[in-house]
Image (cartoon, rainbow, N blue to C red):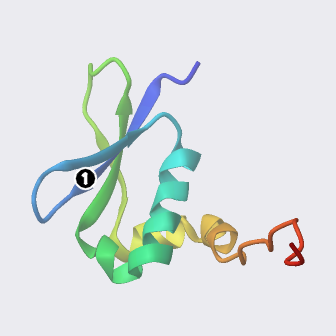
């Protein structure tokens, strides 16, 4: 069982954007943001990691361009073309 939580925060508004149970889930979400809005969207976003219990301080993992770089392995997964439908067009 994972004893950590990963949180994505807006540094512009100070609001929690989303919470994740794993680093992989957080970085996959970062990749989706980059694919949809572009990397500049993350200029005001920081990813934090801390204990799930809430006891202890959150630690900064990465922000902005560093966060995009950290999510790079997940970016290739979001660039895949959508598969064609399996059914034919002859109805």
Secondary structure type for disc 1: strand
Q: Residue 38 location, x and y as percent?
A: 41, 81
Disc 1 packing (10 Å; few <14; some 14–19; many ≥20): many
- 35 is higher (above) or lower (below) than 51: below
Q: How many marks?
A: 1
Q: Residue 54 location, x and y as percent?
A: 27, 22
Out of 22 and 84, give the one closest to the viewer: 84
Out of 57 and 75, give the one closest to the viewer: 75
Quadrant assignment, res 53: top left
Q: Residue at x 45, y 29 (%)?
A: 4
Residue 20 located left or right of residue 76: left
- 52 is higher (above) or lower (below) than 24: above
Q: Residue at x 35, y 34 (%)?
A: 50
Residue reaching furthest left? 13
- 47 is higher (above) or lower (below) than 23: below
Residue reaching furthest front? 91
Q: Residue 25 location, x and y as percent?
A: 54, 46
Residue 30 located left or right of residue 47: right
Out of 43 and 59, give the one closest to the viewer: 43
Q: Residue at x 89, y 77 (%)?
A: 90
Q: Residue 70 location, x and y as percent?
A: 52, 65
Residue named by callout 1: 9
Quarter containing the C terminus:
bottom right
Quarter containing the N terminus:
top right
Q: Residue at x 21, y 59 (%)?
A: 10
- 35 is higher (above) or lower (below) than 74: below
Out of 26 and 63, give the one closest to the viewer: 26
Quadrant assignment, res 7: top left
């Amino acid at each position: 069982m994972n004893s950590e939580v990963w949180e994505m925060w807006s540094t512009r508004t100070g609001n929690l954007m989303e919470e994740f149970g794993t680093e992989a889930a957080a970085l996959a979400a970062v990749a989706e943001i980059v694919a949809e809005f572009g990397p500049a969207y993350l200029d005001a976003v920081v990813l934090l990691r801390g204990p799930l219990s809430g006891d202890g301080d959150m630690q900064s993992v990465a922000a902005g361009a560093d966060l995009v770089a950290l999510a790079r392995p997940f970016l290739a997964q979001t660039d895949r073309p959508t598969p064609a439908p399996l059914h034919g067009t002859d109805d």
